[in-house]
Amino acid sequence: ASWGDGGSPHGYRSSSPNGSSADRAGDSRTERPSRGDCGGPANPDRASAGQPQLVAGDLGCMVGSVYTSFSGFHLGDGTGSIQLALTGRLLERAGFGMWDLGQEHTYKVALGASALPRREFLAKFRQLTSKPNRLRDVLGKGGDATEASALR
């Protein structure tokens, strides 16, 4: 299923020909980074000043209308799920046709991800990498996904 035909906006993953999980490196999305990693720890000085803080994120790449998540992190209970939901909404608004989430995990399935057989995944991936996305239009001039308007 793809977003255009009523499928879930929360992603897809590849599977090996025998139906097992994708043959990729492990997913560290549920691992908590130590203080100082990625510049993302909660900073007490910023918190007291009322400044926004990075509490979850994703590292990945986009080619055409395919976004592939490499790794993610979260610093508090529920922040990873919120980050995934908002990323899915942003990708949907920007016209992405596929979000490759990597290996299957319970929390991904609970958020609506579904596995695709390898052949189907590769065919869809090849087709969608040649189609443009609208991320630049959705984000606007600043190119900042933290703006609430990008997530509406």
Image (cartoon, rainbow, N blue to C red):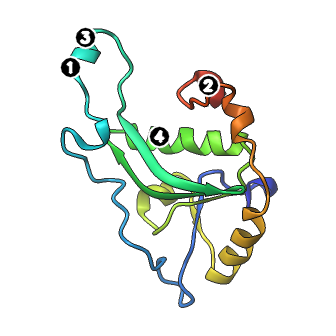
N-term-proximal mark, 1 vs 2? 1
Give the residue displayed 80% in from the left and 54% down from the top: 4
Position above or below: 52 against 80: above
What crowding class fits label 2: few (fewer than 14 Cα within 10 Å), some (14-19), or many (20 or more)? few
Which residue lies under the disc numbered 1? Answer: 44
Q: Amino acid at mark 1?
A: Pro
CB contact under 8 Å: marks 3 and 1: yes
Which residue lies under the disc numbered 4? Answer: 83
Using the image, tell me which numbered label, if any, was put on residue 129. none
Disc 4 from disc 2: Cα separation = 20 Å
Kind of element beneath mark 1: helix
Disc 2 from disc 3: Cα separation = 26 Å
In the rendered image, is residue 77 in sight? yes
Using the image, tell me which numbered label, if any, was put on residue 48. 3
Where is residue 137 drawn, in percent x and y? 74, 34
Give the residue displayed 57% in from the left and 23% down from the top: 147
N-term-proximal mark, 2 vs 3? 3
Which residue lies under the disc numbered 2? Answer: 142
What crowding class fits label 4: few (fewer than 14 Cα within 10 Å), some (14-19), or many (20 or more)? some
Kind of element beneath mark 4: helix
What crowding class fits label 1: few (fewer than 14 Cα within 10 Å), some (14-19), or many (20 or more)? few
Position above or below: 8 against 126: above
Disc 3 from disc 1: Cα separation = 6 Å
